[in-house]
Amino acid sequence: MLTSPSSSVQAARKALADRLRDLCKDAGLNGRELARQAGWHPSKSSRIINAVTPPSDEDIRIWCQICGAEDQAADLIAASRSADSMYVEWKRLQRTGLRRLQDSYVPLFERTRVFRVYCSTVVPGLLQNHGYATALLSSITRFRGTPDDVADAVAARLARSNILREGDHRFAVIVEESVLRYRVGDADAMSGQLGYLLAVMSLPAVSLGVIPFSAERDIWPLETFSVYDSEQAQVETLTAAVTVTAPGEITQYLSAFQKLSDIAVYGAPARALITAAIDALG
């Protein structure tokens, strides 16, 4: 069974807390004495040591100063910031709108050679057309109350998708059949999107599989996730984007992707499911 997508974050914060605890021990201090010297409430050092509360940059500087380890402060602050960046709330990423978020993925996409993408709810961003992307990003903007820059965000998303036709990238994409049936936008938007999927399936770099409703499965529908080469995964929750870098967790996501791939259909059977979804729009 896959672990929680936030477990990489928890592991990184625990590792930082352990390093701070070791500094305290090496200095011959306990948490209560360190808190006294720092002018903190005793519970603060305990919360930091037990990875309950992440320390601020200034907390780490004070900790290292008291422990006589000022030379380690910079590395520990960097580790703390790295842990924080693993779990980023959408409201933070989207506070100025959606365009900047689309652009932020470009460097990652350019350096990735093999994309593995699984979606159980919506068409993956790389395979969206103008109408569908507009409907989806508009609904996200309304739900989260972010500034409305949907037109610019859609343009950026479509420009980013040119990577499907450029370079030596490869794209393995798996969607649940439900993705073909959930109506994002009106019937015309859905029909256009499904037709676009039929077209994009012919691209030599793209492999698109669909998991039928009728598939006998030994793995349940999962949250949307993407694996970039074998170095990094991103998991999407309602409230946050979670970046997974722990090798053990990436291995689990790769294993899950393989199992999902095994029960998907491709080629003519996948096209038949997409065509049936178009026909059902009436």
Image (cartoon, grey):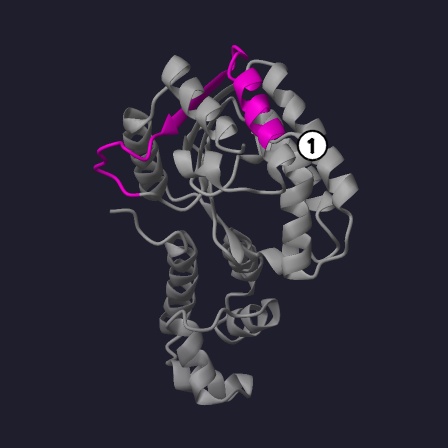
**Quadrant (top left/top right/bottom left/bottom right) for the C terminus:** top right
Q: Is residue 174 left or right of residue 201?
A: left
Question: Can you give x and y, in whole percent of width and height, for residue 204 in the image?
Answer: 52, 10
- The answer to which of 60 and 188 lies nearer the viewer is 188
Q: Name which residue type carries label 1.
A: His
Please check the rendered image and state whether residue 206 is part of the magenta-colored stretch, yes or no.
Answer: yes
Residue at (38, 18) in percent of width and height: 266
Can you tell which quarter of the image residue 152 is in?
A: top right
Q: Would you say residue 172 is visible in this rendering?
A: no
Label 1 packing within 10 angstroms: few (<14), some (14-19), many (20+): some
Please state the extent of the stretch shown in magenta in the rendering: 191-220
User: Element type at marker 1?
Assistant: helix
Classify residue 235 as left or right of residue 255: right
Residue 119: where, in percent of width, then height?
45, 38
Residue 40 to residue 189: above or below: below
Q: Residue shown at 52%/86% (left/top)?
A: 40
Give x and y (percent) for residue 9.
Answer: 43, 56
**Which corner quadrant of the image does residue 267 belong to?**
top left
Q: Is residue 50 above or below residue 280?
A: below
The image quarter containing residue 264 is top left
**Residue 76 higher or lower than 275, as above or below:** below
According to the picture, the residue beneath numbered tag 1 turns out to be: 130
Q: Position of residue 202 (x, y in %)?
A: 52, 12
Residue 278 is a magenta residue: no
Residue 56 in view in this figure: yes
Seen from the viewer's position, the closer of residues 131 and 238 is 131
Which residue appears at 60% of the width and 37% of the height? 187
